[in-house]
Amino acid sequence: MEYLVWAVVMWLLVFILVPFNRFRLLWPVVIVSILLLFAMNFTFIQLGYYHFTKSAPAIAGVPLFVLIGGAGGGILLMNWMQRNSFYKMMLVLLFSGLLALATEALLRSGAFEMQNGFNQTLHYFINVAGLSILVWLSFAVTGEEKIYEGSKGKIF
């Protein structure tokens, strides 16, 4: 249930905050986000650092709704990406912090468990690395200049 809530919240934010024309431009980010999130989660599950504890539709131990929610998060991240390097770094750090808060909620609900010395600090830095890779890959598949163009949101 927690994973479904995660996916619904992320996609509600996408549909509320991201203009449709931006979404059409950023749709390749959905594919990149799902593939990267799956690869990272699968790797860390196999290494024994964490696992998802609640029963849910999953692919190799990675809940499907985690991947779907992560795709929405990837759209949100890339929607607000700017040309300024400092801004890029701050956005990745901010989103990593938000992921740490979401992870804490999953830990407290019992839907996620860290093992073998893995902790929130390590998880935060892995999120920074993963989101940095996501930004780089998203620029590659979408085109960096296209990311910077156009209206960034309905509200902001």
Image: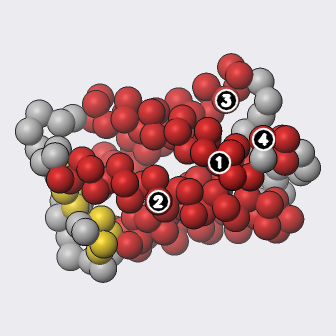
Kind of residue at disc 4: Glu
**Mark 1, residues whose alpha carbon is within 10 Å: few (<14), some, or many (≥20)?**
many
Disc 3: which residue: 88
Q: Which of marks 4 and 2 is nearer the N terminus?
A: 2
The residue tagged with tag 1: helix, strand or loop?
Answer: helix
Q: Is disc 4 in contact with disc 3, using a CB cutoff of under 8 Å?
A: no
Name the residue located 62 percent from the left edge and 33 percent from the top edge: 91
Q: Nearer the viewer, residue 102 or 36?
A: 36
Mark 3 is surrounded, within 10 Å at the Cα level, by few (under 14), some (14 to 19) or many (20 or more) other residues, namely some
Residue picked out by circle 2: 35
Q: Which mark is residue 144?
A: 4
Image-based side of 60 in relation to 77, left or right: left
Q: Which residue is at 61% across, 25% downward?
A: 89
Compared with 151, 18 (above or below) is below
Decide if residue 124 is on the left or right side of residue 82. Answer: left
Task: Give the mark, 1 or 4, whose residue is nearer the N terminus.
Answer: 1
Q: Is residue 46 above or below residue 8?
A: above
The answer to whether any part of residue 107 appears in the image is: no
User: Disc 2 vs disc 1: Cβ atoms closer than 8 Å?
Assistant: no
Q: Quadrant of the N terminus?
A: bottom left
Sooner in the amino-acid sequence: mark 4 or mark 3: 3
* Badge nearest the viewer, 4 or 3: 4
Q: Name the residue under label 1.
A: 138
Q: Is mark 2 on a helix, strand or loop?
A: helix
Is 32 placed left or right of 22 in the picture? Answer: left
- Quarter location, residue 22: bottom right
Q: Nearer the viewer, mark 1 or mark 3?
A: 1
- Looking at numbered disc 3 in the image, what kind of residue is underneath it? Lys
How far apart are labels 2 and 1 at the CA level?
12 Å
Give the colour scheme shown.
secondary structure
Q: How crowded is mark 4: few (under 14 residues within 10 Å), some or many (20 or more)?
A: some
